[in-house]
Image: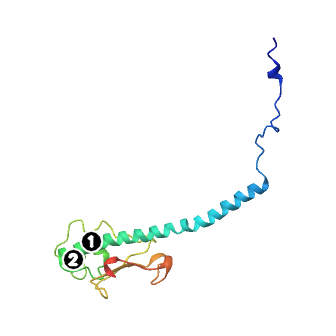
């Protein structure tokens, strides 16, 4: 009996439906679809860092506002514009000197806004005991969109 006949028989893969690769047209369609998807998703992702900066500014302003309220509770007044937010870090030596001031202050340091600008503090404010805001992305008063000023919730 001869068993070797099946081993020597060659199978033609082109006739059996093997892989044939992609045509240029198929590749172009895939590239166009990926381009469309990237065009739809990329603009949404590009705006995320700006939104994160605005959220960070609001959180920092809430923390500063809390420290200002503690200062008020201890002393019966808010720091003046002249004393500024530095009055929350160390006892002011100009203007009204607070009678009750904690040894470590109310904040460890006055943070810069997320665009590395200063937070603006005015006391008394126009319609509130104080105003606290950031000039936003452009570092200038006013602006719109990504450059809009950000005001503390408590000073609106």
Q: Which part of the image, by quadrant, shows the C terminus?
A: bottom left
Left or right of residue 93: residue 44: right
Q: Could you tell me which secondary element the residue under label 2 belongs to?
A: helix
Foreground pick, 115 / 35: 35
Q: Tag 2 or tag 1, which sits nearer the N-term?
A: 1
**Residue 49 percent across, percent down from the top left:** 49, 67
Q: 149 above or below 111?
A: below
User: Which picture quadrant has residue 103?
Assistant: bottom left
User: Residue at horizontal 29%, vertical 68%?
Assistant: 107
Q: Which part of the image, by quadrant, shows the N terminus?
A: top right
Left or right of residue 45: residue 131: left
How many marks overall?
A: 2
Left or right of residue 137: residue 86: left
User: CA gap, disc 1 to disc 2?
Assistant: 9 Å
Give yes or no for contact between labels 1 and 2 (Cβ–Cβ under 8 Å): no
Q: 22 above or below 122?
A: above
Q: Give the residue number, with chain letter if any, for mark 1.
A: 67
Find residue 72 and name its label: 2
Q: Could you tell me which secondary element the residue under label 1 belongs to?
A: helix
Disc 1 packing (10 Å; few <14; some 14–19; many ≥20): some
Q: 33 above or below 19?
A: below
**Residue 74 percent across, percent down from the top left:** 18, 74
Disc 2 packing (10 Å; few <14; some 14–19; many ≥20): some
**Residue 151 percent across, percent down from the top left:** 38, 79
User: Residue at horizontal 83%, vertical 22%?
Assistant: 8
Furthest-bottom residue in this view: 126
Q: 134 above or below 33?
A: below
Foreground pick, 22 / 53: 22
């Amino acid at each position: 009996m001869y068993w070797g006949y099946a081993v020597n028989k060659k199978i033609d893969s082109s006739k059996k439906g093997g892989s044939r690769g992609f045509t240029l047209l198929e590749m172009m369609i895939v590239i166009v679809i990926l381009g469309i998807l990237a065009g739809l998703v990329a603009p949404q992702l590009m705006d995320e860092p700006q939104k994160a900066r605005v959220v960070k500014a609001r959180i920092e302003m809430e923390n500063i506002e809390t420290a200002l309220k503690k200062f008020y509770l201890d002393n019966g007044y808010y720091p003046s514009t002249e004393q500024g937010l530095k009055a929350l870090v160390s006892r002011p030596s100009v203007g009204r000197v607070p009678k009750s001031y904690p040894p470590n202050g109310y904040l460890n340091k006055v943070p810069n806004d997320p665009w590395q600008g200063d937070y603006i503090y005015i006391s008394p404010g126009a319609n509130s005991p104080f105003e606290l805001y950031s000039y936003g992305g452009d570092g200038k008063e006013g602006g719109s969109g990504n450059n809009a000023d950000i005001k503390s919730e408590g000073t609106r």
